[in-house]
Image (spheres, rainbow, N blue to C red):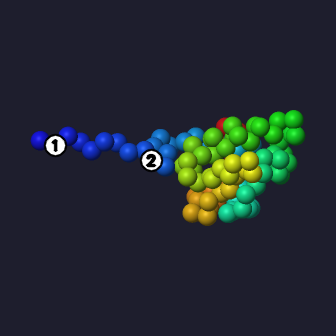
Amino acid sequence: MSSPAPATPSTTPTVPPGPLGRQERAVLSVLTDHVGKVVSRGDLARRAGITAANERRCDSLLVGVRRTLGVDAIRTVRSRGWSLEPHALEAATRLLSQADPVQIGL
């Protein structure tokens, strides 16, 4: 009797994620507008409406976005910023087209 194959890490979420929050949606929207291009922390914060004093907030917001889209959806470019990978554009667009939970009172 053979033993089961070892588990391999997955790049897609295994648990259905909750809806994205307002700021996570804003960050994802900026990245979808610039798919395949690197967006710096400062540009991402400014375009997503995150205050300059809180630019590092982008890092934590991207954790939630990656949890929803999969870790390979957004590429980190050291010392430069982040880029939405072209293969993730369709899923990102679909996610952004869903109703915003804040607007529907959840």
Q: Camera-side residue: 22 or 86? A: 86
Q: Is residue 84 above or below residue 101?
A: below
Q: Camera-side residue: 90 or 77? A: 77
Amino acid beneath label 1: Ser
Q: Quadrant of residue 67?
A: top right
What percent of the width, then of the height, locates residue 55?
A: 81, 40
What percent of the width, then of the height, locates residue 61?
A: 69, 40
Who's the residue at 63% across and 46% down the image? Answer: 65
Mark 2 residue element: loop
Q: Farthest front residue?
A: 79
Q: Which residue is mark 1?
A: 2
Quadrant holding the C terminus: top right
Q: Farthest top residue?
A: 53
Q: Camera-side residue: 46 or 78? A: 78
Q: Is residue 42 above or below residue 88?
A: above
Quote the CA–CA distance across marks 2 and 1.
Answer: 23 Å
Who's the residue at 55% across and 52% down the image? Answer: 72
Q: Earlier in the sequence, mark 2 or mark 1?
A: 1
Q: Farthest left residue?
A: 1
Task: Identify the disc placed on residue 78.
Answer: none
Amino acid beneath label 2: Ser
Quadrant holding the N terminus: top left
Q: Is residue 68 above or below residue 83?
A: above
In this picture, residue 33 sits left or right of residue 93:
right
Who's the residue at 49% across and 49% down the image? Answer: 11
* Residue 26 visible at all: no
What percent of the width, then of the height, locates residue 16?
A: 50, 43
Q: Which residue is mark 2?
A: 10
* Residue 33 visible at all: yes
Who's the residue at 63% across and 53% down the image? Answer: 75
What percent of the width, then of the height, locates residue 54?
A: 82, 36
